[in-house]
Image: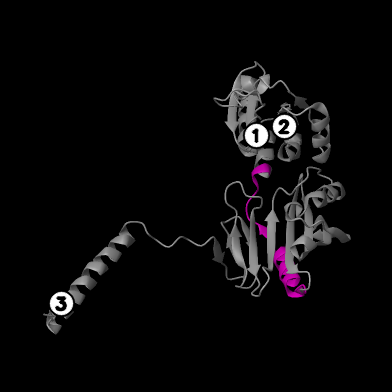
């Protein structure tokens, strides 16, 4: 014999379940399950502020923010994944301690290029290198390209090394494509906008540390 | 190691000397130092007594029971001018933490 649920009782059950679910979800809000705060805050200047540290023009929304987790190799970045049969992607990276140690820009550029894309199997060639100014600071712009035929992959990069007092910092865009693929010039334009708009809102640890050393007479 | 080389100018202002220690032989260390443009000395401690003395092996001896050589774990040690170990931490070096400690020690020794 089939048990029939009376319509009135079914509605009662739905209402009761809704109330219970509502109570449970309502409890979550008070239990701390809140949406995490975005690392990027929009300004009325058409820029974003990243963790109260940096301000810049955000690349279009198809670029995802890459946050540095503890021990990461960079400070912040953006990633764009291209749809298609080959795992093509592009990345912007800001690194406050790029590879190498020289505080001379030309020497640091040489050091930096020996390890750039080191783990990818691509050995990029420097196609062009220019001495430039970025926000009034001396900088070097490096254009690189390389291939890894074993992975049917090629990469094109643009790097800025910028001298900031006693430190050298870097910005890098790398675009990965299949050997038959074409590079997307728009990403390089977006990277340029990102870099040119970049502002430091706080002193870095080392800048503050040097102030401390001066205060201590060291 | 290149992180320490980047901060060498700050270590110098703090009157601190950086020494790297590894179980590799002198030739290997020489080429390693060249590849990272290191300007501070690397000690070739092939008999591994330093790693043992400073606890780089944790609870492991430098040689496995079958006689094969174990390698050092990564360890950063700060020794003050009296020879007292003031800091020892395993894993990748945290340069900010080390610089802050060196500044504190510098102030301590200068009586500030």
- Mark 2 against mark 3, which lies toward the viewer? 3
Judged from the image, the secondary structure of the residue bearing numbered disc 2 is: helix
Give the residue pinned by disc 3: A12
Give the residue pinned by disc 1: B99
Judged from the image, the secondary structure of the residue bearing numbered disc 3 is: helix
Give the residue pinned by disc 2: B11
Residue at the image position 73 percent from the left and 66 percent from the top: A176
Which residue reaches farthest bottom? A7
Give how far apart the Cα atoms at labels 3 and 1 are: 67 Å
The answer to which of B3 and A96 lies nearer the viewer is B3
| Residue B38 at least partly seen | no
Quadrant the C terminus of chain A occupies: top right
The answer to whether residue B19 is left or right of residue B74 is right
Residue at the image position 65 percent from the left and 16 percent from the top: B83
Instruction: Return the chain for callout 1.
Output: B
Q: Quadrant of residue A149?
A: bottom right
Report x, y in % for residue B66: 62, 24
Q: Which residues are magenta?
A: A182-206
The answer to whether residue A30 is left or right of residue A107 is left
Report x, y in % for residue B43: 76, 25
Q: Using the rendered image, report if marks 3 and 1 lie on a common chain.
A: no
Give how far apart the Cα atoms at labels 2 and 3 are: 74 Å
Instruction: Return the chain for callout 2.
Output: B
Residue A31, magenta (yes or no): no
Residue at the image position 68 percent from the left and 22 percent from the top: B48
């Amino acid at each position: 014999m089939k048990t029939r649920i009376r319509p009135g009782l079914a509605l009662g059950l739905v209402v009761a379940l809704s109330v219970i679910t509502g109570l449970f979800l309502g409890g979550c809000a008070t239990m701390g399950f809140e949406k995490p705060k975005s690392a990027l805050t929009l300004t009325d200047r058409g820029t974003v502020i990243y963790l109260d540290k940096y301000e810049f023009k955000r690349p279009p929304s198809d670029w995802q923010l890459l946050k540095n987790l503890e021990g990461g190799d960079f400070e912040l970045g953006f990633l764009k994944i291209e749809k298609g049969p080959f795992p093509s992607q592009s990345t912007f990276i800001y690194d406050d301690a790029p590879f190498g140690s020289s505080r001379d820009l030309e020497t640091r550029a040489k050091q930096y290029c020996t390890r750039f894309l080191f783990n990818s199997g691509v050995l990029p060639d420097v196609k062009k290198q220019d001495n430039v100014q970025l926000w009034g600071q001396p900088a070097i712009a490096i254009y690189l390209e390389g291939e890894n035929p074993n992975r049917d992959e090629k990469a094109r990069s643009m790097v800025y090394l910028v001298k900031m007092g006693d430190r050298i910092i870097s910005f890098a865009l790398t675009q990965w494509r299949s050997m038959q693929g074409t590079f997307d010039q728009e990403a390089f334009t977006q990277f340029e906008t990102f870099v040119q708009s970049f502002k430091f809102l706080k002193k870095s640890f080392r800048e503050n540390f040097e102030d401390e050393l001066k205060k201590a007479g060291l | 190691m290149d992180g320490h080389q980047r901060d060498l100018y700050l270590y110098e202002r703090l009157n601190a000397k950086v020494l790297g220690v590894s179980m590799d032989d002198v030739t290997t260390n020489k080429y390693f130092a060249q590849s990272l443009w290191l300007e501070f000395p690397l000690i070739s401690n092939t008999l591994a007594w330093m790693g043992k003395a400073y606890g780089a092996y944790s609870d492991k001896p430098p040689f496995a029971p079958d006689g094969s050589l174990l390698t050092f774990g990564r360890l950063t040690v700060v020794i003050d001018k009296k020879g007292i170990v003031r800091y020892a931490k395993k894993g990748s070096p945290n340069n900010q933490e080390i610089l802050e400690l060196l500044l504190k020690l510098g102030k301590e020794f200068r009586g500030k």
